Image (cartoon, rainbow, N blue to C red):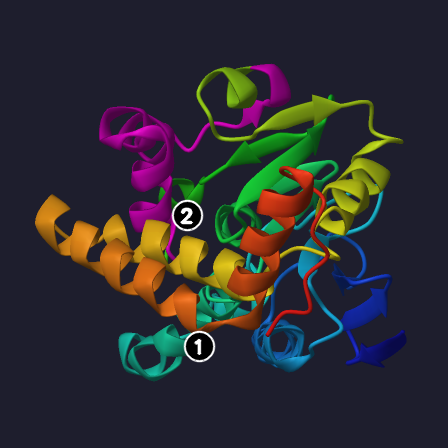
């Protein structure tokens, strides 16, 4: 157990679950400082063996209403050319956590907040949640992965429609188009996300890591290359203790009885 905290982003660990919490009043606007703290929290969640799965949470009122527009309003092209990598890398750091990651979404997940939610493996949303990529309404486009991850998740035509219009998507539509995976009463979103993450406490961590990498990397390449990524990951797991434990347990006790050490 333990907690690591920046000014606006903290990592709290209990029972195998690491909760990355955004807390920047009033709407969790993602500033450059928040981006730096997200990178740090994601790196710590990646490195810590006592973190088996991760919840990304913005509190019970708002997930994150976007990047900090006030901070960006006066920046020039030259400035953003230097800072653009920071905008993307914070979200990418969360996406690359080699463990199951769930976003617990209450209230707004807009712009950079939606992009942060897209970095999770699955998304649980409150019944009153709203998601969207409204950047075009500010004369820009999503800059933290929205043009890439949204299309991969819900398909290019629906992603284009949402990005072109900048409209807010309510929870029921988000569920229907695959933008979120579960819609819950707002008071249950966080607990259900923690429970989902908690199921991996005794899971085969190296197998989960390989599965996530195979799916994510496979989406970026042709089928034959993806199958080769899968083959290599599959074979590599035969060098782990967990594979021996899991197969022995299956033979002796049937499926679902093994407890894994993550080795």
Could you say which quadrant of the image residue 26 lies in? Answer: bottom right
Q: Identify the main secondary structure in magenta.
A: helix
In the rendered view, tell whether residue 171 sits above or below residue 109. above
Seen at 64% across and 26% down, the residue is 182
Query: Does residue 90 appear in this view?
Result: yes
For the C terminus, the image quarter is bottom right
Question: Where is residue 8 shown, x and y percent of the image?
Answer: 76, 72
The quarter of the displayed image where residue 131 is located: top right
Q: Which residues are magenta?
A: 144-172
Q: Residue at x 43, y 73 (%)?
A: 239
Q: Is residue 95 magenta?
A: no
Q: Quadrant of the N terminus?
A: bottom right
For the point 49% across and 47% down, which residue is it?
A: 118
Query: Could you tell whether 154 is left or right of 255 in the image?
Result: left
Q: Residue at x 62, y 38 (%)?
A: 255
Does the magenta-highlighted stretch encompass residue 153? yes
Residue hosting label 2: 138
Q: Nearer the viewer, mark 2 or mark 1?
A: 1
Q: Which residue is mark 1?
A: 86
Q: Could you tell which of marks 2 and 1 lies nearer the N-terminus? A: 1
* x, y percent for residue 111: 50, 48
Given residues 211 and 115, the one toward you in this image is 211
Secondary structure, mark 2, is helix
Mark 2 crowdedness (10 Å alpha carbons): few <14, some 14-19, many ≥20:
few
Per the image, label 1 sits on a secondary structure element best described as helix
Residue closer to the observer: 235 or 97: 235
Q: Tell me where residue 46 appears, x and y as whole percent.
A: 59, 75
Is 247 situated left or right of 220 in this image? right
Residue 9 x %, y %: 74, 71
Q: Nearer the viewer, residue 65 or 201?
A: 201
Q: CB atoms at circles 2 and 1 under 8 Å apart?
A: no
Numbered label attached to residue 189: none
């Amino acid at each position: 157990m333990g907690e690591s905290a920046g000014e606006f982003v903290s990592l709290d660990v209990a029972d195998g679950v690491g909760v990355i919490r955004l807390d920047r009043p009033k709407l969790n606007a993602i500033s450059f400082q928040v981006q730096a703290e997200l990178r740090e929290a994601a790196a710590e969640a990646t490195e810590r063996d006592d973190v088996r799965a991760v919840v990304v949470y913005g509190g019970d009122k708002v997930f994150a209403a976007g990047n900090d527009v006030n901070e960006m309003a006066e920046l020039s092209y030259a400035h953003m050319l230097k800072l653009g990598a920071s905008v993307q890398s914070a979200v990418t750091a969360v996406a690359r956590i080699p463990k199951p990651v769930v976003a617990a979404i209450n209230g707004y997940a807009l712009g950079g907040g939606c992009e942060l939610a897209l970095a999770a493996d699955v998304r649980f949303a409150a019944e009153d949640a709203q998601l969207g990529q409204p950047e075009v309404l500010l004369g820009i486009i999503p800059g933290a992965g929205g043009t890439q991850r949204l299309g991969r998740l819900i398909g290019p035509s629906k992603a284009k429609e949402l990005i072109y219009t900048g409209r807010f998507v309510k929870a029921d539509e988000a569920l229907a188009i695959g933008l979120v995976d579960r819609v819950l009463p707002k008071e249950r979103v966080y607990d259900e996300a923690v429970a989902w993450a908690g199921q991996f406490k005794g899971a085969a961590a190296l197998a989960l890591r390989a599965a996530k990498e195979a799916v994510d990397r496979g989406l970026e390449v042709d089928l034959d290359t993806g199958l080769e990524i899968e083959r290599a990951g599959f074979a590599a797991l035969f060098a782990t203790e967990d594979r021996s434990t899991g197969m022995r347990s299956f033979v002796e006790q049937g499926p679902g009885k093994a407890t894994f050490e993550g080795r």
